[in-house]
């Protein structure tokens, strides 16, 4: 008789107690959860705050910016091999468009593969989200010193917004120039270059790739330590920026110094009638430059089969451009050189050769060229080869003859 109510009560009690037990368990768990969460959150905040300064050393600033607004926290210190820079993001936004489109440091730790891949990137969008003033990249391929540097500094003076300089010297050589020089801090990470081998074309491509990292560079000119400008900066700039063609020397030479250097191993990728020759000192626009550093298929053929007495620097660009980009190439160079004396090397001019008349005769040597499909007497903007002793007379006549 009693069993039922008791049991009912029991059941009820049990139920209730179960209820209470469950409720208090839930409450306890809830409190524990909340406390734990609060503890973890607090610990997280503390850890985050204290660690952010250290952590950002090991991550790029972009990671830091995902979690914390950059302006509230200490500046990340980007780690760059061989280049210790302390960027303060309070003053310089590390993810700014400026640092992306115009990297201020040329030092980097990228391998050629990494560099060429990065440099091959082309924006899909037409318009630029910043005021893009097209620049000319002057790329100096040199063993070491630039003896004619004072002449170039005079040439560049006052045009800082319109050019970038890149110097590829032999590894270990450090260009020693004052901080006010246009050449200061313009050396790129380099590798050994052996004249006549594909390491020379590697150097040219390395210069192009480094210069492509600056999105404002629109024209790219390769120069050597013995090159000089023969017109003032404004004339050179307008000529190059305004040209609808690139200036890569490219011609068919049927002799053994031309077609004679073709290797049958390149067939059928490259056929004999496509084979071209040309001077190494090129000038090209950005689109062509991206294409050049992106090509590995044809370049590897030259590396493999164009060996002495085939010289990749005289055949790779002329042939590759003839095959794929010939229509927009002027097929001529803008760098004057004198082969008239014969022999394997062009004439070199020194102290006693440099006169007003001589430079004027290079500026207009009687040849008529085509510029944007119209005839012009201005065929050359630069000239080689000039020895270090030519510097003083060149400086003397630069303002009267070259107008800089
Ligand atoms: C760099 O040039 C300056 C001034 O011309 C000279 O004093 C200094 O010794 C040079 N440094 C090196 C490493 O050659
Ligand atoms: C340069 O040569 C190419 C053939 O590779 C030709 O199509 C092009 O018209 C030439 N350029 C000029 C300016 O004549
Ligand atoms: C740059 O050169 C490429 C290939 O020669 C050509 O197709 C392109 O139209 C040129 N671009 C400009 C902006 O001149
Ligand atoms: C002008 O200079 C070029 C390059 O050296 C040469 O090929 C050409 O023959 C010269 N023209 C004259 C008329 O001397
Ligand atoms: C350069 O000009 C200076 C001053 O006009 C003169 O003394 C010097 O001899 C000139 N040098 C050369 C190589 O012409």
Image (spheres, rainbow, N blue to C red):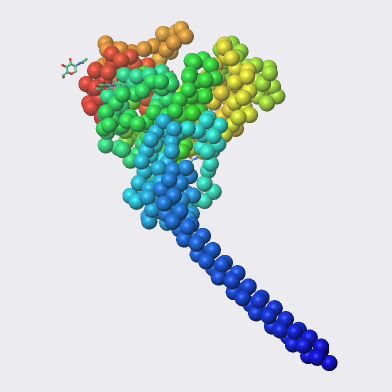
Above-or-below relation of 165 to 264: below
Left or right: where 404 falls relative to 273? left
Looking at the picture, tell me which residue is in the foreground, 9 or 150: 9
The residue lying at 63 percent from left, 17 percent from top is: 305
Q: Residue 348: where, in percent of width, then height?
A: 36, 12
Q: Where in the figure is residue 76, as x and y percent of width and height?
A: 41, 46
Q: Residue pushed farthest front?
A: 2
Query: How many numbered dots are placed on residues in this image?
Result: 0
Placement of the N terminus among the 4 image quadrants: bottom right
x, y percent for residue 63? 49, 49
- Which of the 4 image quadrants contains residue 327? top right
Is 33 displayed left or right of 99 in the figure? right
Where's the C terminus, which quadrant?
top left
Residue at the limit of the structure toward the right, as seen here: 1
Residue 114, image x, y percentages: 54, 34
Q: Residue at x 62, y 24 (%)?
A: 300
Asked if residue 350 shows in the view, the reply is yes
Residue 136 sits in which quadrant?
top left
Report if residue 402 is visible in the image.
no
Residue depicted at x 52% and y 23%: 201
Residue under the image location 50 percent in, 33 percent down? 110
Vertical arrangement, residue 63 with respect to residue 299, above or below: below
Question: Which is nearer the eye, 91 or 191?
Answer: 91
Q: Is residue 93 above or below residue 206?
A: below
Q: Nearer the viewer, residue 93 or 261?
A: 93
Q: Nearer the viewer, residue 123 or 44?
A: 44
């Amino acid at each position: 008789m009693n069993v039922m109510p008791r049991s009912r009560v029991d059941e009820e009690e049990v139920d209730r107690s179960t209820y209470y037990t469950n409720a208090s368990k839930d409450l306890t768990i809830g409190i524990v959860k909340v406390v734990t969460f609060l503890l973890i959150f607090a610990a997280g905040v503390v850890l985050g705050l204290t660690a952010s300064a250290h952590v950002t050393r090991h991550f790029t600033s972009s990671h830091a910016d995902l979690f914390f607004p950059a302006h509230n926290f200490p500046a990340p210190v980007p780690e760059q091999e061989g280049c210790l820079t302390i960027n303060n993001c309070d003053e310089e936004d590390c993810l700014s468009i400026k640092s992306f489109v115009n990297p201020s440091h040329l030092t980097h730790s990228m391998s050629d593969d990494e560099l060429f891949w990065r440099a091959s990137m082309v924006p899909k969008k037409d318009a630029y989200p910043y005021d893009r003033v097209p620049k000319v990249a002057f790329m100096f391929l040199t063993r070491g010193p630039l003896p004619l540097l004072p002449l170039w500094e005079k040439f560049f003076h006052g045009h800082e917004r319109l050019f970038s300089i890149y110097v590829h010297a032999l590894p270990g050589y450090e260009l020693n120039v004052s901080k006010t020089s246009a050449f200061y801090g313009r050396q790129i990470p380099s590798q050994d270059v052996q004249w006549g081998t594909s390491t020379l074309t590697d150097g040219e491509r390395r210069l192009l790739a480094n210069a492509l990292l600056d999105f404002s560079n629109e024209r790219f000119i390769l120069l050597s330590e013995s090159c000089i400008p023969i017109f003032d900066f404004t004339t050179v700039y307008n000529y190059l920026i305004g040209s609808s063609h690139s200036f890569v020397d490219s011609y068919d030479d049927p002799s053994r110094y031309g077609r004679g250097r073709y290797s049958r191993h390149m067939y059928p990728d490259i056929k004999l009638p496509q084979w071209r020759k040309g001077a190494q000192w090129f000038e090209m626009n950005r689109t062509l430059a991206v294409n050049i550093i992106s090509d590995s298929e044809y370049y590897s053929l030259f590396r493999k089969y164009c060996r002495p007495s085939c010289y990749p620097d005289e055949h790779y660009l002329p042939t590759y451009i003839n095959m794929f980009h010939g229509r927009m190439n002027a097929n001529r160079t803008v760098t004057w050189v004198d082969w008239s004396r014969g022999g394997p090397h062009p004439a070199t001019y020194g102290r006693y050769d440099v006169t007003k008349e001589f430079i004027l005769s290079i500026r207009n040597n009687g040849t008529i060229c085509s510029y944007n499909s119209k005839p012009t007497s201005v065929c050359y903007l630069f000239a080689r080869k000039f020895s270090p002793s030519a510097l003083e007379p060149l400086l003397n006549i630069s303002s009267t003859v070259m107008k800089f």
